[in-house]
Amino acid sequence: IDTRRKGRVAGGVVASIVSQNVVDMFNAAKAAHGNLTLSSGVRSYEEQAKLYAQNCNSAGSCSPATAKPGNSQHEVGVALDIEYNGQTICYKQASAGCHNNTGMDWLSAHASSFGFYNLPAESWHWSVSGG
């Protein structure tokens, strides 16, 4: 898969190989009942390193889960951090402080038909492999 070419979609940039799937998924969600947007698509190695340093301790324990630089699907543009109606996507659980989970419900039911799968440790993170 050539992920070097990039495409601009829904307020962000992703690998062109997935850009049409992202557009189609976001359009389908909007037609159903809400607006999905990217809070993060492509990240450079340097951006990933900064996030890793910010979220992880010296033992490699991270909160939230954060891929090591060079290992993130964001770096090749096949991972999406998604917002729904301007709010971070989150799971239905009291500790998450979620009040409206329509976006998560819709993605859980439909994202796989567009080739995207959720990383269980991060409700907002969807990628071509779920990683």
Image (cartoon, rainbow, N blue to C red):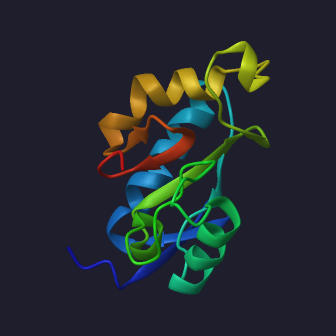
Tell me residue 29's x, y (percent): 56, 34
Tell me residue 108's x, y (percent): 45, 26
Q: Is residue 29 above or below residue 50?
A: above
Task: Using residue 27 as the reference point, say whether residue 93 is left or right of it.
Answer: right
Quarter of the image for the N terminus: give it.
Answer: bottom left
Tell me residue 43's x, y (percent): 55, 75
Tell me residue 59's x, y (percent): 52, 61
- For this orientation, the residue located farthest to the front is 59
Can you tell which quarter of the image residue 27 is in?
Answer: top right
Q: Is residue 77 above or below residue 103?
A: below
Q: Is residue 13 above or below residue 24?
A: below
**Residue found 48% across the figure and 75% down from its top:** 7
Looking at the rendered structure, the number of numbered marks drawn on it comes to 0
**Residue found 37% across the figure and 44% down from its top:** 116
**Residue found 38% across the figure and 84% down from its top:** 5
Task: Using residue 116 as the reference point, say whether residue 9 is left or right of it.
Answer: right
Q: Nearer the viewer, residue 93 or 99?
A: 93
Can you tell which quarter of the image residue 47 is in?
Answer: bottom right
Task: Using residue 49 as the reference point, say whether residue 93 is left or right of it.
Answer: right
**Residue found 45% across the figure and 75% down from its top:** 75
Q: Is residue 67 above or below residue 85?
A: below
